[in-house]
Image (cartoon, rainbow, N blue to C red):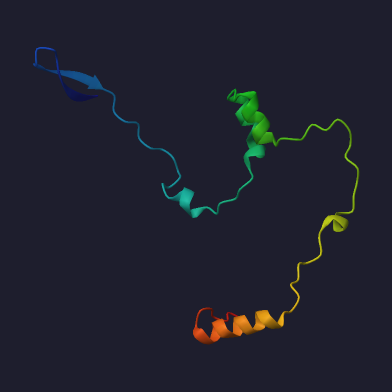
Amino acid sequence: MRLERKSDEKGQITSAPLPLARENTSSRDANDYHRREFKAGQLLQYIGNWEKLRAPPQLISIISGYSLPFNSRPPLRRIQDSIPPPLVTSLSGNMAIVVTDMLEKGIVVKTR
């Protein structure tokens, strides 16, 4: 046991026993965490541990992955039909003159 110095209400120094710190018997190095490659999305693998630790139901729901409560199955649609065609600006002679002028004056710089 180690003694810690304390003062009582009269200002007199007293001693109080403190337990010694436990020896680290772990085989892991303190830097192991930083050496491992991070891999996200693993919480679900440990859902049983969360439940054993009595995590709140809301947390279990979040970790398990929330699912949308549909009243009925949504209709199947072809995704390609809902994607708009690429937006293309038609060529303009006036715009070309303005852009060329800005390039010559150094207002804009050609990047490609």
> In the depicted view, which residue is nearer to us: 109 or 19?
109
Q: Indicate the quadrant containing the N terminus: top left, top right, bottom left or bottom right.
A: top left
Picture layout, residue 11 above or below residue 71: above
Q: Residue at x 89, y 37 (%)?
A: 73
Question: Relative to residue 19, is residue 67 drawn left or right?
Answer: right
Question: Relative to residue 86, is residue 80 drawn left or right?
Answer: right
Q: Quadrant of residue 21?
A: top left
Residue that lies at the very extreme toward the bottom in this rendered image: 104
Residue 101: percent from the left, percent from the top? Answer: 57, 85
Q: Quadrant of residue 64?
A: top right
Q: Indicate the quadrant containing the C terminus: top left, top right, bottom left or bottom right.
A: bottom right
Q: Residue at x 71, y 35 (%)?
A: 66
Q: Quadrant of residue 69?
A: top right
Residue that lies at the very extreme toward the top in this rendered image: 10
Picture layout, residue 53 above or below residue 32: above
Q: Residue at x 75, y 35 (%)?
A: 67
> In the depicted view, which residue is nearer to us: 34 or 91?
91
Question: Relative to residue 79, is residue 68 drawn left or right?
Answer: left
Picture layout, residue 39 above or below residue 26: below
How many numbered tags mark residues here? 0
Residue 10: percent from the left, percent from the top? Answer: 9, 12
> In the depicted view, which residue is nearer to us: 61 or 33?
61
Residue 34: percent from the left, percent from the top? Answer: 47, 52
